[in-house]
Image (cartoon, rainbow, N blue to C red):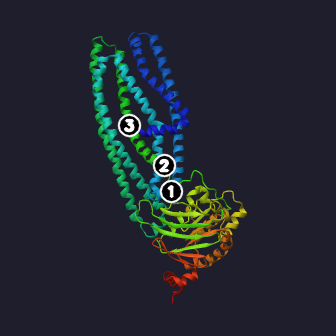
Amino acid sequence: MDIIRRGLVYLRPYWRLAAGAFISMLIVTATNLYVPQVIQQLIDDGIEARNWDGIIWATVILFGLALIRGVFSFTNTYWSAESSQGIAFDLRNEIFEKLENLSFSFHDTHQTGKLMTRTTSDVENVRTFFAQGLLQLVSALITFIGSIVILLLTDWRLALAVLTTLPVIIGIFVYLFSRMGPLFGEVQRMLGKLNTILQENISGIRVVKSFTAEPFELGRYRDQNEALYQQNINVARYFSTGFPTVFLLSNIGTLIVIWYGGSLVISDELQLGQLIAFNSYLAYLLNPIFQIGGLSQQLSSATASGNRLFEIIDTEVEITSPANPIPITNDSPGHLSFENVTFSYQGSDSNVLTNVSFEAHPGQTVALLGSTGSGKSSIVNLIPRFYDVTDGRVTIDGHPVQDYDLNMLRQQVGSCLQEVTLRSGTIRDNICFGKPDATDEEIIEAAKIAQAHEFIMQQPSGYDTQVGERGSGLSGGQRQRVAIARVLLVHPRIIIFDDSMSALDAETEQELKSALQPFLENHTAIIIAQRISTVVSADQILVIENGEIIARGTHSELLESSGIYQDIVKSQLEEEPA
């Protein structure tokens, strides 16, 4: 099984714990197989022979075996649990790291709820299998084979009679297992959908309530929960049909032992103790089959979960650093150039950008203006290599962005987005997210430029005020200013403002622009905005439509040369309410 083969790779760092658990399992299994032999001696050499020494000696041996079994059952359980927790620890870390490194195109096509399911319940399913299922499976196989050998050595005639039911029982379990894999894969897929609905509603609860959409969302969740319930019932139906049949066949085997074995005892061809031991080994023979049948559910679930986990782990990271990157430092000028850039999203046949070309020199501010969906955000996403161009080049200081180390590149390209994401924690933690070792003076300076210092000092604990998950407790404009301070603190050479002032009032926006002006003298700035007031002072304004630059120039130049720009200005600046 692929899940076992690949899982053992993660077990290597914990091989001492795994070896201890395995040896403990072998000892427990050996004691279990030896117990019927002692009972046989107790009956034949002790009770039947009325020999107290034989009874006492067999009793002492049974007590010793029980003690050994208890000790090594503990070490088996404890060490296997510890090693499996190590597997889960490494899997969670690797999957989280992989999700962090995968490109935006992967996250564009995978729902958050499903990814959460993979990093939680799928990892736990794999861990549970390696904590319990794998050793139990090995123990069951050893017990099964050992019981067959002992049965044949005890009385081959009786053993062959009993083993006639075995192929049918094994066939039933093979059939059940072949059906369980796809069923459990579907269960995990449905669970991922359910988690997606849950995640969407928790993160967007304000939208749900504002539109009084609670009944609709409740119905959507109930429908998906009903589908998951029905799928689990389908799984249970297979087990409830197969196991009674197996129990019936096992009871037939017991009847064969009682009837045929009893006749052999009566005819003095078999001792009573041997018959009792034989019946015990018959139980040892059938119990592993039942155990393997029960483990088939766990193995099917773990296989489905493992396939989903390894699907993420095996996903190729599309955007990586080159083998020999060109160094980029804080002293790099930050000269940005787009050269005939064409771009389309993965899986799409249409271009989002077509032959886009422009330059932004250090100290310059370039503004992108256009309607929603015109391609403005796609342009700025290519600068830090959130995506790679389909054709053409994006260069910084004359070198394609693909030639730079990815981490160094993104440290020199700061992005202030319209949709602000803040972490739970203090305002200070959020501002110094990109520079954890920043001093108080640096944090305050960045906050002052971002026009955030004043409202921060009005908070109950100032910079140490807890903002809550996703920045709850702050207004939209306050969150945007904290996000701007976060970028300014790291002093990137190129700064992108992607509609990041949309929640600010006109007065605050003007104060922020005035404070930013001296800061941006040595930086390259790209501004995306819907309002003319935000871009009017830019050194170059690019008007974007359908992924193409249809006009460019300063505010005054575009007022003279671009009819579309004139229409935008007229609609925003000249149409005053009566």
- Asked if disc 1 and disc 2 are in contact, CB closer than 8 Å, the reply is no
Residue furthest to the bottom: 578
**Which of the two residues, 179 or 391, is positioned nearer the viewer here?**
391
* Residue assigned mark 2: 120
Kindly identify the residue that appears in the image at 47 percent across and 39 percent down. 7
Give whichever of discs 1 and 2 has the lower sequence position: 1
The answer to whether residue 240 shows anywhere in this view is yes
Kindly identify the residue that appears in the image at 37 percent across and 49 percent down. 186
Give whichever of discs 1 and 3 has the lower sequence position: 1
Kindly identify the residue that appears in the image at 36 percent across and 58 percent down. 223
Mark 2 to mark 3 CA distance (whole Å): 23 Å
Mark closer to the observer (1, 2): 1
Kindly identify the residue that appears in the image at 38 percent across and 40 percent down. 297
- Asked if disc 2 and disc 3 are in contact, CB closer than 8 Å, the reply is no
Q: Which mark is residue 294?
A: 3
State the image coordinates of residue 202 (x, y, percent, origin top left).
Answer: 48, 60
Asked if residue 315 is positioned above or below residue 41 in the image, the reply reads: below
- Give the image quarter of residue 441: bottom right
**Which of the two residues, 397 or 156, is positioned nearer the viewer here?**
397
Specify whether 99 is left or right of 170. right
Q: What element carries label 3?
A: helix
Question: The residue under label 3 is which amino acid type?
Answer: Gly
Q: Is mark 1 on a helix, strand or loop?
A: loop
- Give the image quarter of residue 418: bottom right
- Asked if disc 1 and disc 3 are in contact, CB closer than 8 Å, the reply is no
Q: Which mark is residue 103?
A: 1
The answer to whether residue 461 shows anywhere in this view is no
State the quadrant of the N terminus: top left
Mark 1 to mark 3 CA distance (whole Å): 40 Å
